[in-house]
Amino acid sequence: MISPELLRYYPYFSRLDEAQLIKVAIISDEESFENGAVIFQEGDIANALYFLLDGQVDLYYTLAGKKNSPLEKGIPVGEINPGEPFGISALIEPYMLTATSSVYGSARVIKIDASELRTMFDEDRRLAYFFIHQAAKAAIERLHATRIQLAAAWA
């Protein structure tokens, strides 16, 4: 469990009321990661929604058969900055991660239990709307960034 005050500090959570902040805080933990740590892998079940407190997390799409090449780690497709969610697949069926996340430098995150959060959605449609809306917004922003990368690669 984390303090609801920690959530309140970030504009991302500003539309949650006090009761919602407390409920989310109860199912959340703070975790720290060192340089190069992999928080989750593409293709795994999405058990948590993450929110970056500080540091940087990079997202990669993995490539089969690229051992011992510059692309072994995967293709970089995005960078998560403080104040942004990641692991948003935890909110979207079939709840499978679509990228691998790797820490650049070090990072501190809030890890929100996705199963518990989705259960709360059944009881609080406003909470569900808030999180799904934020996930859709993040997905669209990442899609736009990926399109820019593709256009640059083909130019």
Image (cartoon, grey):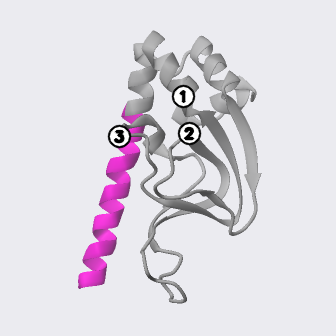
Badge 1 amino acid: Ser
The residue shown at (47%, 74%) is 74
Give the residue number, with chain letter if any, for mark 3.
Answer: 136
53 left or right of 143?
right
Q: Position of residue 109 (x, y in %)?
A: 67, 46
Part of the protein shown in magenta: 133-155
Q: Which is nearer the N-term, disc 3 or disc 2?
A: 2
Q: Nearer the viewer, residue 48 or 32?
A: 48
Q: CA distance from mark 3 to mark 1?
A: 19 Å
Q: Which is nearer the N-term, disc 1 or disc 2?
A: 2
User: Which disc is residue 47 wearing?
Assistant: 2
Decide: is 94 above or below 16.
below
138 left or right of 110?
left
Element type at mark 1:
helix
Q: Which is nearer the N-term, disc 3 or disc 1?
A: 1
Give the residue number, with chain letter if any, for mark 1.
Answer: 115
Badge 3 amino acid: Ala
Q: Nearer the viewer, mark 3 or mark 1?
A: 1
Say few, some or many: other residues with alpha carbon within 10 Å of mark 3 (under 14 / 14 to 19 / 20 or more): some
Q: State whether residue 14 appears in this view.
A: no
Q: Position of residue 7 (x, y in %)?
A: 65, 31
